[in-house]
Structure formats: C-alpha cells, structure tokens
Image: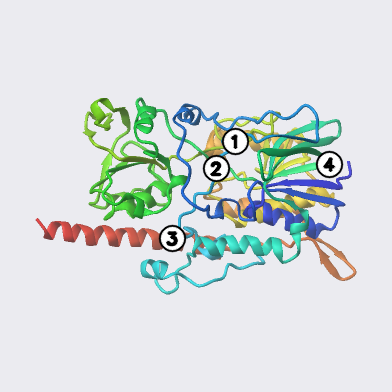
Amino acid sequence: MVIKCVAVIGLGPAGAITVDAIAQEQAFDTIRVFERREAPGGCWIEDEGPHPNLDPAALAPLSSRNADKPVPTPSELPKKALKANQPRYAESSIYPYLETNVADLSMSFSQEPITGPRTTLSISKYGEDTPFVHHSIIRKYIESLVYRNDYERFVEYNTTVELVEKVGAEWRVVLRKEVKGQEDEWWEERFDAVIVANGHYHVPYIPRIEGLEEFERMRPGSVKHSKMFRGREQYKGKKVIVVGASVSAADIAVDLIGDASSPVCAVILGHKFNHNFGDIAFRHPGICPKPSISHISTDDNTRTVHFIDGTSVADVDEIIFGTGYTWSLPFLPSVEVKNNRVPGLYQHVIYQKDPTLLFVGAVAAGLTFKVFEWQAVLAARLLSGRATLPPISEMQKWEEERIKERGDGVWFTVLWPDFKGYFEGVRRLAGEPRQEDGKIVGRVLPKWDERWLEVFLEGHERRMRWWREQNERAMEKFEGGK
C-alpha cells in the first residue's frame, strides 16, 4: 500500500520531531497533526492558574487505571454538540521554577542543540556549567521545531482525537474541537497511516487507600498528584505526606523542606527506588521515611493517616502522590494497553498487527527527547517506503525474548542500560536518507555517540551530589543543635 495521507496525534516533543521527520521525507500529500492543547509543547506548556482539584469520585477509577474513558462520538458527522464535561487530564505538570532533570546534550535532538541561559537557581545547585535548563526553554525549543519550517500549517490546535478505527484500508479519525460557547465541533478525516505521539504521562495513577475519598471530600484539594504540584509556596506550615519513591516524589519532598511543617513524611519504606538515584534524596533529616499507608481516618475531623507499621500522623493537611501515570489510549479501542504498556510494538514503534499504526515515545528511561528522533525517523522511512520491516515471525520473536528478559510490564519499555544497542538497531532499520539532485532528502540519524550517555550519567551524578551536600549540611546543623 502506498502511504500518502498521514495523521500525527500530539505536538509535544515526540510529535514535533515526528512532523519534522515526515515532512523531510517529501513523500506525502497530506500531513495532519492534532493537538488538544492551544500550542506546541505538550506537557511542557505551563497552565495558567492552579490545577483543578480531583473529583473524589474519580479516585477509584484512577486507582484501577480506567479513569480516562472514551467520549461517545455523535452518530452523524460533522456535527456540533454540547461540550463534553468528562475529565481528559490534559493539564500539565509544570510549576514556575521547574527545570529539566536530564542534561541538555542527552536531551537534544541530533541537529538542534538546546540553548539558553541557565537560571540562578540551577547555577547555585550545580555550578556555572549546569546542564539543566528552565522549563520555558524546553517549550520554546519544541515550538521552534514547529515554527521554523511553518509546520503549523499541518496543525489543528484545541482538537482532541476521540476515535481512531480502521475502516477498510483507511484509518477513520474522529475529532472534537473546543470552540467558544457551549458546543464542540465534531468531524472525521481519513488517513492511510496514523502515528501516535501523544505521550503517556498525563493520566495520574493514585493507589487505592481506604478513607482517601473522605479525606478529599472533607477539605477539597487535600489529595494531589505530582502533576498538580505548583510550587512550595502553597505549603507553608502545612503538614504534608509525599507518597512515592522515585524522582517526582523525591524532588517534591526535598523542595518542601523548610516550608512545609517539619518533618515531611515520605512513604518510601518497602518501595522500589529509582534505579539511577536510589534513596539519596530521602536521607535528609527533614524527611521522615514511612511505609505504605494502611488507611486514613477522618472521624471527629482528625484527618489521621495510618501506616502499615502501626504508626500514624494526625492533622494531615495534604497528601501528594508521586506514583506515576497510567498509559491511556481511549481513542484506540482496537489497541490493548496491558500492564501499563502497549503489547505488540516492534522496537517500541511498529504495531505488528497493522504497520500503518506507529508509536513515537512509547519508551521509558530512554534519553528523552533524543530517542523520539530515532523512532520518528524510523516511522517516517517505513511509511515513505524507504525502509522495510523484517518478517512478522522475527518481530514477534523480538517481543517474546524481551518479555523473557524484562517481564511483561513497564520494565519492558525501559531502554536502560542498552542505549547503544537500541539506538543503533533503530538507525540500521531506518536506513539512510535518499540523495536527490545532490541534496539529502530525509532526516539523517548519526551513529551512537557514547558521550550522550556519559553526559546523561554526569547529570545524574550532579543531582545526587547536591542531594548529598544538602543532607550533610542539614545533619551537621541538626546535630549541632542538640
């Protein structure tokens, strides 16, 4: 089948580089991009105002990973209909002083370095040559990839993809555009291929805890996910419990020291720490480690959080969950999401049951954003007919062997530690761009550079060094005050 019409879902970093890779192939008559936010950037767009409170009734669906339900589509299209009031969890996780936690070189696309001034805060923590940048620079970086070649002409903003289904040889894409007033505009378009690049860090996962709904109902805004965090200033003097043992929970717990009521309780005991950072951030004397929460009691307005070791903390103001996200594809009813991954993706990109459906960004711990570029180029080359897939038996074998090695869960999607093997494998599969009239047509993927990984790890070490220094200074101050 000749692919001439391609749809891209999402215009965050994965979507932006995908559009560039497709456009540079110069092989398609129609490129359409659907972005539900108002601009490029995805989760790097800073929302105006606070994140809305969680609906207590949504906590149970969030804990069972089925909160992001499909929105019913009109039977006839095009059509105007009343605005859908179902939460879609499109809000970002940006707060004013958020910075990247991956070094700029490791994060950059191969032909577009991340540049921009470093903040006083970043320099104070990591030195004059800090590799971390403010979130606004990343948003501008993504925007520049879209704006510089007028890729906006492909884009429908404020438009949510509500259904993607195969009808004959085409993909039927049903779209809902938010317009002013009380109505949404609905319509459909048809494509030869669809690339899903909408990310998987937007639907929060909050574990089920007895009494959590009542805790939130008693004082709306008491239960938050890390994506709802908007800065330490909102927690002055508050008694806070942070749940989670990985990066977002570590950053928030450390950030609250000195503003929130001391100590900040962190639910980490018995939980798996991030494989890069371990528990270093949580060793600060201003953080009190706790095991899992058994239940919450709100009798007589006590708002007491009980832990499985029998201890408890009374008069808790807020609980912040840094417990990750649920991978949600409500618009793709034919595609299963199992164990928080999409089964059947060869090289995390190609849907084996139908190679005209591809994914960019379906990985974890993978040198974000750089890995998106490799996946985007592979997708573009395959759809342009300039790259070929191995037999289905070989693709199935790749997945089977990876499941044996890593299991059938999130760890399947983690590229660590074999970055070189993955990047080079994708580059070889994508092949080289073609030459036409002495010019290169298509995006060039460079060979793996070990420096990318070295800088990535050096950045991690800087963060760990700062945590250690803070811990040591605080401990000296604590012991000196005894």
Q: Looking at the picture, which amino acid does disc 2 mark?
A: His
Q: Nearer the viewer, residue 228 or 79?
A: 79
Tell me the element at label 1: loop
Quarter of the rendering occupied by the C terminus: bottom left
Q: Earlier in the sequence, mark 1 or mark 3?
A: 3
Q: Viewed as shown, does residue 378 lie left or right of 89?
A: right
The residue labelled by disc 1 is: 328
Residue placed most toward the observer, 321 or 267: 321
Relative image position of residue 462 (x, y in whole percent):
40, 63
In the image, taking residue 69 as reference, residue 190 lies left or right, namely: right
Q: Earlier in the sequence, mark 3 or mark 2?
A: 3
Labels 1 and 4: the sequence-earlier one: 4
Which callout, 4 or 2, points to the residue nearer the camera? 2
Three-letter amino acid code of the residue under disc 3: Tyr
Q: Earlier in the sequence, mark 4 or mark 2?
A: 4
**What residue is shown with label 2?**
202
Label 3, on which residue? 97
Q: Horizontal and vertical percent for residue 116?
A: 54, 71
Do callouts 4 and 3 mark residues in contact (Cβ within 8 Å)?
A: no
